[in-house]
Each structure stands twice: as structure tokens, then as C-alpha cells.
Amino acid sequence: MTAQGPSRLKWIAAIIIVGVMAVGAALLSANRFDAARAERIAAEESDEIVVDSIYSDRIEGQYDPDYDRTRYQDIARSFADDPIHIDEYRAFDVDDASLDAVRETVDDLDVPIYVAILSDSDLDDADGETDLLAARIARELPDEAATVLVVGEVSEGIGDRGAVRRLTDMPETDADDDASETALRYAQALTAVDVEDPAESYSRTIDDDGQPVIVNEDTARDPRELAYPIGGAVTGAIFGVIIGGGLGVGGVLVIRQLRKRNGHR
């Protein structure tokens, strides 16, 4: 056998190692994808409730208006006694004089205005979207037409039911205003605008069927529809080429060095 024969065999072996590693890495990547997808499908099909945190079930509510309507129904029922609903957590952020002024402003309107001063958060069942909170409360009202104003901790939202009060310019508020003062400014602004028929006016809080508009859409795909991407296979193969190439070339160089030490070419 010529001197070139063993050398050629070394490089052929190196190429084989690279190929095996590339194919193996791609197959391993596909197998791990299939295992993860099967696990997700099994979790969705089971009746087991998995709670990652105390808020996880409420976060799901932002995508589903029917997830749990109890909170909104309770608020809507409270308006039968008082047009203002106040979360216990916000009771420190109101004053009686402003609340009385709000009640006087919304008293005896043909299309009522209800005010909910709520503690909103990115972890609540509307993802902290005050427009969505207002729309879901409005949905539960017994009135044929009404407006719901939600005063949150950092923003305000307006919900419609059977009528639209559209504010083109939001009231100016002061950083030092408490929640009841902010509610008063918005209530005064809402009473000053025309009441429009929702069929003839765009509403940002309800759709054409009168259902609350979901602000954040759930973009998660059904795991049954997931397919292993070609890019994943290519990435796995490239990873295998890199690892296999290093092993193959490294092996050839090591063998060559050993042969030199032993007096072989």
C-alpha cells in the first residue's frame, strides 16, 4: 500500500465521522422536538390542573371573556346600589367630596355612567387593560345602554353597552390627583359628549356582536399543529458537522502525530 493509501483512508474516516455526527445531531434534534410536542399534547388533553403561579389561571382570562365572569358580575350588581364601585385596595385613594361630585355628575342620565375604581395589574384577568375591564363589566349590566368608566392605578378605560360615548380628547389629569378626582374629571368629560348608536359609531371596546374586544390575542399554537421545522434539522446538521469535523480532523492529526513519534509516515 502506498503512503498515500493510509492518508486517504484517514480522511475518508474523518468524512464518515462528520456525516454520522451530522445525521445523528439532526435525528436527536427531531426526536427531542417530538418528545416535547407529545408532552404538551398530553398536558392539554388531561384534566390535571397545572398552576405555575397563583396568577396563571387569571392570566388565561385575558384571552377568554367567558373564563370567569364572577368578578364582573359582582361589580355590575353593585351599581344597583351605588354608581361607584371601589376596590378595597383603592379605598385609601379616594375622598368623599370627589365621590359625591361624581355621583352628582352621573345622576339621572338617560344613558347611565357607572364608575369602577379598581386595582389593575398586568397579572389580573384582563392583563391590566382598563378598556377590557370596562368592556367586560359593561357586558354584565342589565341596562340596554350604559357607559362604564374604569379608573385603574396607572390608566383609565371606557366600556360601552348599547351606546358609545367617545372621547376624542382625554381629560387632563394631575399626578397629584387621587382616584376619585380622576374619576370626576372623566365623568364630567363623558357627560359632555354626544351619545352615539354603536351601529353607527366605532367602539374600541366592543366588537360588532357586542362582545368585549380582546386587547392581547393568544398567539400560542395548538401543539397538534406544530411541525418540526426544516431549519431545526439544518441547525442540528450544522451542529453535527462542527462537532464531527472537529473530532474527525482532530483524530487524523492525533494519529499522524503518533505515527511520526513511532517513526512512521
Image: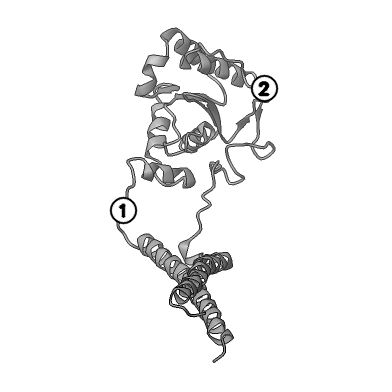
Q: Residues within 10 Å of mark 2 (few under 14, many from 20)?
A: few
Q: Could you say where residue 112 lies in the image, as x and y percent from the top left?
A: 53, 25
- Choose between 241 and 215: the one closer to the eye: 241
Give the farthest residue toward the top: 97
Q: Secondary structure at mark 2?
A: loop
Does residue 136 sit above or below 79 in this rendering? Answer: below
Residue 49 got which mark? 1
Q: Secondary structure at mark 1?
A: loop
Q: Could you say where residue 87 lies in the image, as x and y percent from the top left?
A: 38, 24
Does residue 73 sit above or below 169 in this rendering? Answer: below
Q: CA distance from mark 2 to mark 1?
A: 45 Å
Give the farthest residue toward the front: 263
Color encoding of the figure: one colour
Apparent side of residue 138 relative to residue 172 in the rendered image (left or right):
left
- Choose between 201 and 71: the one closer to the eye: 71
- The answer to whether residue 50 of the structure is visible from this angle is yes
- Choose between 255 and 25: the one closer to the eye: 255
Give the farthest residue toward the left: 48
Q: Work out whether mark 2 precedes mark 1 in sequence or the reverse, and give the earlier one.
A: 1
Q: In the image, what residue occupies the spot 31% across and 59% down?
A: 47
Q: Could you say where residue 233 lies in the image, as x and y percent from the top left?
A: 54, 69
Does the residue at mark 2 contact the one at mark 1 (Cβ under 8 Å)?
no
- Choose between 187 and 52: the one closer to the eye: 52
Does residue 228 sit above or below 100 in this rendering? Answer: below
Residue that numbered label 2 is attached to = 169
> Which mark is nearer the camera, 2 or 1?
1
- The answer to whether residue 107 of the structure is visible from this angle is no
Q: Could you say where residue 225 lies in the image, as x and y percent from the top left?
A: 51, 65
